[in-house]
Image (cartoon, coloured by chain):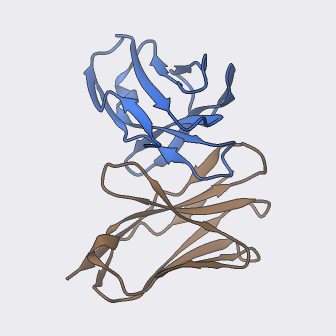
């Protein structure tokens, strides 16, 4: 069974804090990994692809641990505008098989 | 502006009354897909299309139809809607497939009474 598990939260953090989310996936043959951001009732938007070597984009860092089958997202210096739901997404095979979306982790950054 | 356009944004209908949700993209993407999002269940794929006249079932295709007669359009058809199809629907597209960045439409909130 293809599953992507995330802690639903909510994570309530003060501005400026560092917060990390993990996501576990069930199939070691998984090929592609992504983090999407979704604001309430709006469309998801790609935040980052996750590469084997890890990658960073400004305040955001994504890591992949294939041995333990999890990916992580680290947000440094949290802003109020970071408040959203973060979706972990896994492509279980190469090619164009359906993506599997996690249910999301809700982040609330508080002033 | 590059975008995926879905219509309508909100739709209330009654059981059994056929409806179509339209989706159009202006990025010349080959891959298009439909998802539904329900509380506690996350996003689930309904159907996807690799190119014109090529469609495949996703995880939850029952009760839905799609067509891809031209590259830019990928309508979702509910021949006989039922209350369990009340959901938030998203259309998405990408250049070649699901391994790439997906561009989502703004969503259609459907209520079937």
Above-or-below relation of B81 to A102: above
Q: Can I make out residue A84 in this image?
A: yes
Which residue is drawn at the image coordinates 69% and 71% (left, top)?
A51
Which residue is drawn at the image coordinates 55% and 24% (left, top)?
B62
B112 or B101, which lies in front?
Answer: B101
Q: Quadrant of the C terminus of chain A?
A: bottom left
| Quarter location, residue B78 | top left
In the rendered image, residue A53, in percent from the top left (x then y), is placed at 72, 79
Q: Is residue A40 left or right of residue B38?
A: left
In the rendered image, residue B55, in percent from the top left (x then y), is placed at 67, 25
Q: Is residue A58 left or right of residue B84?
A: right
Above-or-below relation of A111 to A91: below
| Residue that sits furthest to the left in the current view | A111
Which residue is drawn at the image coordinates 56% and 48% (left, top)?
B102
Q: Can I make out residue B113 in this image?
A: no
A105 or B107, which lies in front?
Answer: B107
Which residue is drawn at the image coordinates 28% and 85% (left, top)?
A15
In the rendered image, residue A87, in percent from the top left (x then y), is placed at 48, 61
| Residue that sits furthest to the front in the current view | B1
Across the whole image, how many numbered discs are drawn on residues? 0
Q: Which chain is blue?
A: B
Q: Is residue A33 left or right of residue A10?
A: right
Colour chain A appears in: brown
Above-or-below relation of A54 to B35: below
In the rendered image, residue A35, in percent from the top left (x then y), is placed at 54, 64
Q: Is residue B17 left or right of residue B58?
A: left
């Amino acid at each position: 069974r293809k599953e992507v598990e995330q802690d639903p939260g909510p994570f309530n953090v003060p501005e400026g804090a560092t917060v990390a989310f993990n996501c576990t996936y069930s199939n070691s043959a998984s090929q592609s990994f992504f983090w999407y951001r979704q604001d309430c009732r709006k469309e998801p938007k790609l935040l980052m692809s996750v590469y084997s070597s890890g990658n960073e984009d400004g305040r955001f860092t994504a890591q992949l641990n294939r041995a333990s089958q999890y990916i992580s997202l680290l947000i440094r210096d949290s802003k109020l505008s970071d408040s959203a739901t973060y979706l972990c997404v896994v492509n279980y095979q190469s090619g164009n098989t359906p993506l599997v979306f996690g249910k999301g982790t809700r982040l609330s950054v508080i002033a | 502006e590059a975008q995926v356009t879905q219509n309508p944004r909100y739709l209330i209908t009654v059981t059994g009354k056929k409806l179509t949700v339209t989706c159009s993209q202006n990025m010349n993407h080959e891959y298009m897909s439909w998802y539904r999002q329900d509380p506690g269940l996350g996003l689930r794929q309904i159907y996807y299309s690799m190119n014109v006249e090529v469609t495949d079932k996703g995880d939850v295709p029952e009760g839905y139809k799609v067509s891809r007669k031209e590259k830019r359009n990928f309508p979702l058809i509910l021949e006989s809607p039922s209350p369990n199809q009340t959901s938030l629907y998203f259309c998405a597209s990408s250049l070649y497939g699901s391994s790439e960045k997906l561009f989502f439409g703004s969503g259609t909130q459907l209520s079937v009474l």
